[in-house]
Amino acid sequence: MAFTFTDKYLKEFVTDFSLAAMTDEAKRAFDTVYSGSGAGADFLGWLRLPYDYDKEEVERIKKAAKKIQDTCDVFVVIGIGGSYLGARAAIEFVKGQSYNNKKKTTPDVYFVGNDISSSHLRDVLEICEGKDVCINVISKSGTTTEPAIAFRIFRDLLVKKYGSAANERIFVTTDKVKGALRPQSETLGYESFVVPDDIGGRYSVLSAVGLLPIAVAGIDVDEMLAGAKAAADKYSDGDIFSNDCMKYAALRNYFLRHGKSVEILAVNDPALTMTCEWWKQLFGESEGKDGKGLYPASAVYSTDLHSIGQFIQQGTRVMFETVINVNTEDGFAIEAEADNADGLNFLAGKTVNYVNQQAFLGTVLAHTDGNVPNISIELTSRTAFDFGYLVYFFELSCAISGYMLGINPFDQPGVEAYKKNMFALLGKPGYEENAKVLAGRIANIK
């Protein structure tokens, strides 16, 4: 199995007795997820998705991906949050961070609409110059500010470049019946896919939300869904000592209750950098409410051992780590040199991955010595199957952990706070009273 979860580095931090004491609580949370009896149960569609996904839509996604591959050099994906992070994480997980710079037969994939940076938009527009372009806008409402701005700009680019034929290069992933993008799709003939009603954005990467960009990058979406199904099969048993999702959820809550308020997801392969970003949204948006939750942070080793590694080793003792150890041996060996000017001949004949594994072990030992508990997940490959498996593992763990925490793991009421202020400051109709209040506050700040 390419995925191995272990708590073997936690022996001095958590006893079997302590974990057993959380068994009943973890079981109740697990049962709450599977019975659909908890808060937010209307958004449990991801739980059965590996079994019940719309197979006809997935076939349409694969056909659309082939059409995009055959007709464009650059594929621009427009979305924010769950409409962006999962797909980018999947592409980089399987294909690497340098996907766009590699020789390949699939289009480059760029993501916009995930910020309000004019320089970012201009950079991607410049990349598109002289190239054939297709776009995929992903938004349930069609009115979220960041992607809506980007869609206007890139839609206009296509119209100027292709005229009425631009409509064949615009792909929409949105609500099945409502939202601003649905009537546009029907009127203008954009090919469209559905954002499921029962799956929130941060849980949606294995739905049409993520699958179209993933398929365009040449990744086998059937294998990805098979990986998720394998995880769903494995973690359907409600025994904390055999179900690693339950164990991970219990350990997270145990550490939180014992003074650890920060969880660092650490990875030892930069191809998982965006997986970390997706994970931070999943756990941060799911659990950070009602004054509760662990703060989700991330680190990429060994790079970050030369920056925040000092703080992790000796700073405030408020953290534990969940480390994804990518152990993929490819035979990339270090050769001996006659003069040994850099002093590395002691590594001659060793592979780069071997060195990385020793760095992983050395870091685990150093950090646990520094009172930073380490949970470990080992991956021996980075395939589409592995990504689907990992996604489902974290999604189920998050749902169980959230119910153990006593919150609704499927809503995100706090996300609206900045939007209301931004709309008021921008003069959006309906926000006039709030605008007056904010104007007074700003005047006092000045």
Image (cartoon, grey):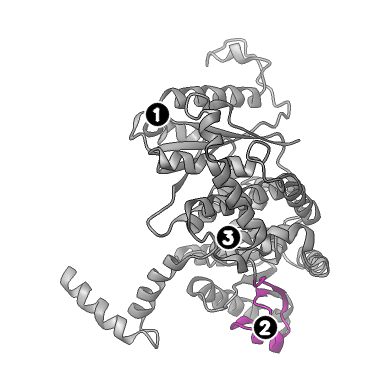
The answer to which quarter of the image holds residue 445 is bottom left
**Position above or below: 265 against 352:** below
Distance (Cα) linking label 1 and label 3: 31 Å
Give the image location of residue 409, x and y in percent.
53, 59
For the residue marked with disc 1, what is the amino acid?
A: Gln
Circle 3 packing at 10 Å, graded few (<14), some (14-19), many (20+), is many
Residue 202: give its label.
3
Disc 3 element: helix
Q: In the image, what residue occupies the spot 69% across and 22% down?
A: 333
Looking at the rendering, the stretch of residues picked out in magenta corresponds to: 172-197
Q: Quick check: 199 left or right of 117?
A: right
For the residue marked with disc 2, what is the amino acid?
A: Val
**Closer-to-camera residue (340/442):** 442
Distance (Cα) linking label 1 and label 2: 52 Å
**Position above or below: 270 against 345:** below
Residue 313: give its label.
1
For the residue marked with disc 3, what is the amino acid?
A: Arg
Circle 2 packing at 10 Å, graded few (<14), some (14-19), many (20+), is few
**Closer-to-camera residue (69/268):** 268
The answer to which quarter of the image holds residue 261 is top left
N-term-proximal mark, 1 vs 2: 2
Circle 1 packing at 10 Å, graded few (<14), some (14-19), many (20+), is some
Quadrant the N terminus occupies: top right
N-term-proximal mark, 1 vs 3: 3
- Disc 2 marks which residue? 177
Give the image location of residue 269, x and y in percent.
59, 37
Residue 82: give its label.
none
Q: In the image, what residue occupies the spot 44% across and 48% down?
A: 294
N-term-proximal mark, 2 vs 3: 2
**Position above or below: 95 against 357:** below
Give the image location of residue 419, x and y in percent.
41, 72
Disc 1 element: helix
